[in-house]
Image (tube, coloured by chain):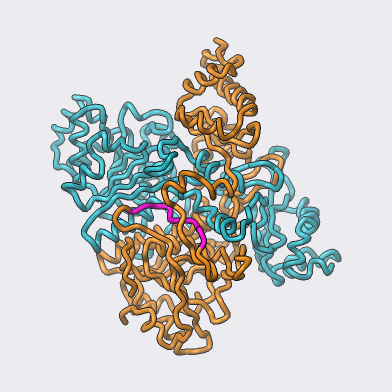
Chain colours: A cyan, B orange
Amino acid sequence: MRPLEGIRILDFTHVLAGPFCTRLLGDMGADVVKVNSVKRAAANNAPNSPYYAIWNRNKRALALDMSHDDAKDVAISLAHQADVVIDNFSLGVLDRWGIGFDQISATNDQVIYVQMSGMGSGGPWSDFVTYAPTIHALAGLTYTTGVPDGGPIGLGFSYNDHQAGLHGAVAILSAIEARRQTGKGQQIDLSQFEVGTAMIGVSLLDYFVNGKEAHPCGNRLPYDMFAPHGCYECRSEGDDILDERWLAIVCRDDEEWQSLCSVMGDPEWCRSEKFLSAKSRSEHADEIDDHINAWTKEQDANELMYELQDAGVPAGTVQTGIDLVESDPQLQAHDFITSMDESHPALGETFADRLPIYFDKTPCETYKRSRVLGEDNVDVLADWLGMSKEAVHDGEEAGFLT
Amino acid sequence: MRTRGEALRQTRVVDLSDDKSIYGVKLLADLGADVVRPEPESGDPLRTRGPFDEVSGESLWYSFFASSRRHFAVNETSSASLYELNALLGCADLCFIGKENALADRVNVQAALTRNPKLVVVDVSPFGSSGPWCDFKAPDLVASALGGSSGITGDEYTSPLKLFGELNFTISGAYAATAALAGLNHAQKTGEGQHIEVPVHECIASSLEHVFMWYYYHKHFPNARARALERRGSLHWTNLYVVMPTKDGAMMVTPTPNVEAQLAWLIEEDAYQDLLDPKFEEPENRRRYFERLMEVIREWVATEETEELFYKAQERHAPYGWVQTVAQVANNPQLKARSWWQATKVGDRKVRGPGVPFQFKSTPARVTDPEWLATDTSSVLDTVGWEK
């Protein structure tokens, strides 16, 4: 038994933030019914795309063409059976379909609605269109991730979509806990912009309290005096940027610093007075970086990592996706990458990076491939609404279950 | 027991987290859980994390991450005090443990799980309790390197970069909160608690958007030259989202989701250059068309004022993003209109601080003032008010 078995989720989300949220819940056993349609199944929302396949495992696929009134009737019936209805459409779409919170909660007062919009409901920007890179920019994450005086570099992947998905899961499970106490569901307005802004919460507090503004600081920490604290180039494996090998090294206290010096063979420069205290090391961090870069550049990153870790110095090679899949012994020991239960009709064998949560009593070891459009129409509508196979096939032929 | 109106008001949490999961406990505390955070009499080491209030000397890092908690000191040399600390777990619903928490090795988790069968223990560590790296040290930068996020952050002219601050540990923190609430759901339904492990390494690796897709399905992407993408600044794996310099700042620009509308806008602005060349209609030139489109947009954006361009884009439903500094975020009109900021106690002052990233309509979440319980831990349970 998985920890969320018995929870029914009607999922109207698309792209990444919402689907990542419901993937988490599906991995933990919730019955997630992913609604899609022929008309919406394009680009990354097409079930045959790898992107869709990754974020929509462990869900059942229902096709509903919401331009048909009959589809809206089915959606209303499903919402009445749902514990959770979740979407990341622009505000008001579910209301227009007749399945908004006010419409459904009048008769299903236990239902929980989560709207994961970019900006939240209300406010001058509430209609703004956002994707994760938009949020990164607006929330200060793009500005702060970079090197001093280097202009904004920002994030090369949709970090905030993952955070929004995780926050959505926390919100849903908290609302379920509240419902256990009150007997009532409720509406949750999750602004992806506010999730992103919370990620620089400490810097915002510093701004309000001290009037100080954080700026990009490369691999250093913005406030703490840790040095060295950087990525150092090691021996390359070729001429391509993907062949570069880098090693992250951090010393947080004198003990780790002394250990690092010892691994480096106690070179004379290490004994300089200016490197004796954490404060002084921090003041001379650039100089330390130069020395360490000179030391690491002809060495094998992995060998050096083991040597440093054995000596008690935090160190880790900068891993690419290839490293994570092919040579990370820790991920391999935990079977982190696993095959889906069966072949995907369009993509063949598909893979899952497993849920990084290990429950000792309710293990989550089920990884079912993402489903193609409407693949579970019969099962879902029988389970949730008691519809017969014939009625479902009639709906498919009539075009509203497509 | 405190009486509050938030979603998790009935949930009792013992917080022995370290920096890898303290954000997750904050989420639960701000959602109303009754969270007590014991610390050694010498003080919680995380109170030494900067920045600090220049008036009181208080850690702002701690004010943010350890919000809405009740705190008390444990005398580590007193068996009565340690007994009380362990007894607290007997009345808790959730307990978060972090290897680097100063008191983590002072509680007997197995005994607590036996004594309190409904208890859910969430154990967050860099790599979990097994595997060849389980004893590795991994502060945020090292976790970021090994977990894969540094490998795709930075630019060709920089080293691999970590995300600003501790964005990797807020990922593991959010995973820890999710794990705790899932475990709580099961415990409430069945009476069965459990021990849950959350390895930070895997949390980071599972939150890298395109990385595993690129490895397994790179043949589906015409621009893929290898099974991994190199670090390349803000350029998204689709090649269609990137930060561009404007006349007076920077803008995250994308022609998606409506490329035709973007082209129409460039035509209106007389900035379309050769984009209407019929050669771009040919299927073999479509990739080149998108490359050229991004080049043309870049040249045009460089002549525009940031703020004006941003609002013009959003009026057209183009998801451009104005690259905002911390000060600009602090003065953002959307956050103000949604009353997002909350009064936060720092020293003796109330200051404006970050709010909670979800609005619950019936059980609103909020940041509450920290509360300091008696340092006399011989009666912690009475002070906390939890039933024995």
Quadrant hosting residue A236: top right
Residue B175 or A295: which is nearer the viewer?
B175
Residue B75 or B95: which is nearer the viewer?
B75
B108 relative to A364, above or below: below
| Left or right side of B350 for A59 | left
The structure residue drawn at horizontal position 55% and vertical position 35%, both measured from the top left corner, is B237
* Residue A396: percent from left, percent from top: 21, 28
Q: How many marks?
A: 0
Taking the magenta stretch, the answer to whether it contains residue B283 is: no
Residue A262 visible within the image? yes
* Residue A223: percent from left, percent from top: 64, 60
A372 relative to A140, above or below: above
| Left or right side of A33 for B319 | right
Residue A153 or B214: which is nearer the viewer?
A153
A395 relative to A341, above or below: above
* Residue A292: percent from left, percent from top: 77, 57
Magenta residues span B351-360
The residue furthest front is B349
The structure residue drawn at horizontal position 36% and vertical position 68%, both measured from the top left corner, is B194
The structure residue drawn at horizontal position 31% and vertical position 52%, both measured from the top left corner, is B361
The C terminus of chain A, quarter of image: top left
The structure residue drawn at horizontal position 59% and vertical position 25%, both measured from the top left corner, is B297
* Residue B333: percent from left, percent from top: 48, 44
Residue A19 visible within the image? no
Quadrant hosting residue B298: top right
The N terminus of chain A, quarter of image: bottom left
